[in-house]
């Protein structure tokens, strides 16, 4: 509903007091009209007259009273409309929400780095030439089978351990428990077996050295390649780190400036709201001519404002 709030006119404290006086005066008129009737009733008992219903006719100025009551309520409604309008205005200002019109700087898209993976040993074997691969296979087979023959529990190892214990004569049981001699003739000599062992051991060492050579070569190739890859990854990562650091610094500077502007904007908003609240608090009611006589009739009885 429209209001007549302005910088001049009736103060809100005066309006509240007059609104209450209007209500009290209208209540008094209502009381005067309460219980009016059309007739009185009396009864005579033992020569004594008693009134059962007291006569209460309408006041002779009933029209003026009803008009006055309506005028009082209209004035009160006018005043309350403005009082509520001012209260609502103050509440609206109190609830007024700050919302910055500035746009926050967009967070940069930082670069990421997917490092090149390190190679496995299979890569190293793939670096050998065909000739080297074939030589490795040959040396590995020779070293494995020679070693299997001469090492512990191998054929040659068992022969050498067994030879010193071979007896030249053994006995076997035949029919009816009869025992006959068995002549044992050895066809190996310890020196010969030792010489064979030494010869094969020398061959084993030769082939095993080549096997170890190729294994070491492959491990070195893998280590060198992985070192190269790691260095390249480090260089690339450092390049990205520098780029991201620059982006971060630029973003941080922009965001610091943005937050500073937002804080300034917030303070200006609050200052404006305080000014508006002060102005709203000082608002008065410009009295419509329809209600001026009624308000004046009560205003003269109020204490002057300080």
Image (spheres, rainbow, N blue to C red):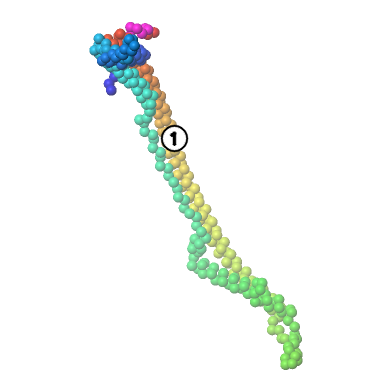
**Residue 204 % position (x, y):** 62, 71
**Residue 129 % position (x, y):** 49, 65
Please tell me which residue lies in front, 68 or 34: 34
Q: Would you say residue 183 sits in the magenta stretch?
A: no
Residue displayed at 42% across by 44% down: 111
In the rendered view, would you say 94 is above or below 10? below
**Residue 161 % position (x, y):** 71, 76
Q: In which quarter of the image is the C terminus?
A: top left
Asked if residue 201 lies left or right of residue 32, the reply is right
In the rendered view, would you say 268 is above or below 181? above
In the rendered view, would you say 291 is above or below 233? above
Task: Tell me where residue 247 sits by quadrant.
Answer: top left
Please tell me which residue lies in front, 41 or 66: 41
Asked if residue 234 lies left or right of residue 171, the reply is left
- What stretch of residues is rendered in magenta? 299-304
Asked if residue 75 lies left or right of residue 203, the reply is left
Asked if residue 114 lies left or right of residue 280, the reply is right
The answer to whether residue 270 shows anywhere in this view is yes
Task: Tell me where residue 7 sits by quadrant.
Answer: top left
**Residue hosting label 1:** 252
Residue displayed at 26% across by 14% down: 39
Q: Magenta part mainly helix, strand or loop? A: loop
Q: Name the secondary structure under disc 1.
A: helix
Residue displayed at 52% across by 67% down: 132
Task: Tell me where residue 34 sits by quadrant.
Answer: top left
Q: Quadrant of the N terminus?
A: top left
Residue most toward the left? 63
Residue displayed at 33% across by 10% down: 48
The answer to whether residue 276 shows anywhere in this view is no
């Amino acid at each position: 509903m429209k209001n007549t709030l302005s910088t001049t006119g009736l103060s809100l404290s005066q309006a509240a007091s007059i609104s209450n006086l209007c209500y009290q005066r209208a209540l008094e008129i209502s009381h005067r009209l309460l219980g009016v009737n059309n007739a009185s009733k009396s009864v005579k008992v033992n020569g004594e007259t008693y009134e059962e219903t007291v006569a209460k006719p309408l006041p002779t100025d009933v029209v003026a009273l009803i008009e006055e009551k309506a005028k009082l309520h209209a004035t009160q409604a006018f005043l309350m409309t403005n009082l509520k309008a001012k209260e609502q205005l103050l509440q609206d200002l109190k609830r007024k929400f700050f919302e910055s019109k500035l746009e926050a700087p967009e967070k940069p898209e930082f670069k990421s780095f997917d490092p090149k993976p390190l190679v496995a040993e299979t890569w190293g074997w793939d670096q050998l030439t065909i000739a080297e691969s074939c030589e490795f296979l040959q040396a590995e087979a020779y070293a494995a089978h020679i070693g299997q023959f001469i090492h512990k529990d191998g054929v040659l190892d068992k022969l050498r351990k067994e030879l010193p214990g071979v007896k030249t004569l053994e006995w076997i049981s035949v029919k009816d428990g009869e025992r006959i001699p068995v002549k044992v003739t050895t066809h190996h000599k310890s020196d010969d077996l030792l010489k064979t062992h030494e010869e094969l051991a020398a061959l084993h060492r030769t082939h095993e050295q080549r096997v170890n050579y190729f294994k070491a070569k492959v491990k070195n190739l893998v280590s060198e390649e992985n070192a190269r890859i790691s260095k390249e990854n480090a260089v690339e990562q450092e390049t990205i780190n520098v780029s991201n650091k620059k982006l971060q610094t630029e973003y941080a500077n922009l965001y610091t400036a943005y937050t500073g502007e937002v804080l300034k904007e917030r303070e200006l908003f609050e200052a404006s709201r305080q000014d508006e609240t002060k102005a709203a608090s000082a608002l008065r009611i410009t009295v419509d001519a329809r209600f001026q006589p009624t308000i004046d009739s009560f205003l003269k009885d109020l204490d002057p404002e300080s």
